[in-house]
Amino acid sequence: MKLRGRKKVALVLVALAALPLAYLTYAFAQRQATRPRRPATSGPATIAVKAGDNLQAALDRARPGDEVVLEAGATFVGNFVLPFKAGDGFITVRSSRLAELPEGRRVTPADAARMARVSTPGAGPAVLAPPRSHHWRLLGLEITQAASSLTYDLVQFGDGDAEGPQDTLEEAPRHLVLDRCYVHAFGPQAPLKRGVALNSAHTSVTNSHVSGVKVVGQETQALAGWNGPGPFHVENNYLEAAGINILFGGAPPTVRGMVPSDIVVRGNHLYKPLSWKLGDPAYTGTRWTVKNLLELKSARRAVIEGNLLEHSWADAQIGWAVIFNTANDSGEWSRIEDIEFRSNVIRGAGNGVNLRGRDEKSGVKMSRVRVENNLLTDLGEKWGGYGIAFQVLRGPSDVTIEHNTADAPHAALMFDVDDPAETADGLSFVNNVVRHGHYGVFGSGGAMGADALERFSRRWKFAGNVMAGADPGRYPAGNLYPPAFDAKFFADAARGNYRVAHPRFKGRATDGTDPGCDFDKLEAALAWHLKPPAAVR
């Protein structure tokens, strides 16, 4: 039967109207086919994400207990968010070849082929844990830039998102793990301001490699935290940055009164490549802004142990390896309290450890800091500094510097204030092996030795030390003042073995042990994560 003309037109119009719906249905089906699927099970799931799949969709779909497994060798470009999930089970995001990256072993760039790559396309982070995000583990991932333009943070744990700043303690993301990850700049000339931002709670960075963090004219950090409560666990990582390799504090926290606390920094290698050092044969031509290797500006209850800190030269600062400096940019809040810096090796720096006790703006002082059993070598003019082992400024309280061996040519202990209100209260300098050098123990106005201790500290103790080259008449009794460190004093200083060997000095510390560093204890601390360096074998 033939259709009349009007009926034909109506049927054609209906068919045409149905085409967009059919196309949308087909397109949706095709998209769903390429999205990572969750198995139909009520228990923990494994969500496989292959090259070309939607990684953010997998992260959004994952539930506590799940594993999001990224195809090794695949690249996922974007600014990926670890969203809030109800429940306290960890969601693991890992490489499909994670089993080839053994637990407890620090990864290197050579492991990249076993990893999945996550890249940011621009200034924003490759991975963001926003406020209230929690219980995420990132394992065996390469995290980098997709191009050589400036990126601010490759991994951003906390401190706000598009909805606003993180301004309450409850908003801090928590229970975050970065393990066996390779976090790095796009290439040798790519600017990168920060590897990992730690503005979170219950966070660990372990067995990872962070490198290429550098910018001309800006401070950079491999790891930095200023607006998260902790605890923080930073263990067995290679951390490379031009500015400051590890920094806690500095920027004003948006959470009022926030002090990063309960910090463990153990078994890491903090390093600046000589290719960044102007005048070195390895220099490659770009003068990245260099500051120091480790700095605390606001921190409470920290243990820094068994780390190797190498290369810090005068540039934007004067080449200190380590600075404890009670300050933040606003002056509203900062604390450095209950800090232990022990069994570390510092080598290749302008100067050693600088303890600056007071925030100039808020007046808060540093208190209860212990610097013990460290080895400091190769300090001085080669690195653009003076060669000062230890410096105490602006009146910290209850500072102990004990059982350290420091081969510094300029001074053993410097004060640099001339105000009685700024004197150190409760300074103990005991059982150290140091050179007197040009100034020994010295403060502004020409005070030296016992005079400097009286002028710049209260309740001081100076005993059991060996200070080579000092005038015994200017220093307190109860110490040893040989004219120099002769060839028999150390076991083999030329090869880096600074154990006390001379029988006259063995067992002469106030506790009956050898003065200076306990090398058995130092080697044990270093052996946890790396082959002991030549200096302490």
Image (spheres, rainbow, N blue to C red):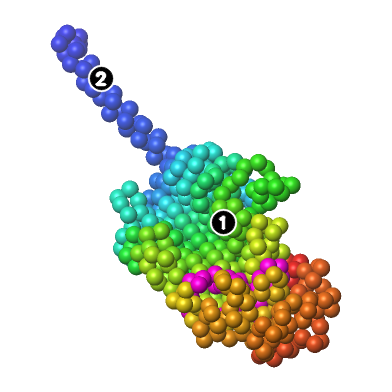
Q: Is residue 473 above or below residue 326?
A: below
Q: Which mark is residue 317?
A: 1
Can residue 178 be seen here? The reply is no
At 62% from the left and 42% from the top, the residue drawn is 286
Q: Secondary structure at mark 2?
A: helix
Extreme residue toward the front, this view: 445
* Residue 531 placement (x, y as % from top left): 72, 66
* Residue 478 placement (x, y as % from top left): 67, 90
Q: Which numbered disc, 1 or 2, marks the residue closer to the eye?
A: 1
Instruction: Report the amino acid beneath label 1.
Output: Gln
From the viewer's perspective, tell me whether residue 444 is left or right of residue 497. left
Query: Residue beneath label 2, please?
Result: 16
Residue 417 part of the magenta-drawn span: yes
Q: Nearer the viewer, residue 141 or 157?
A: 157
Please report the bounds of the magenta region as a residue range.
Answer: 390-418
Q: Secondary structure at mark 1?
A: loop
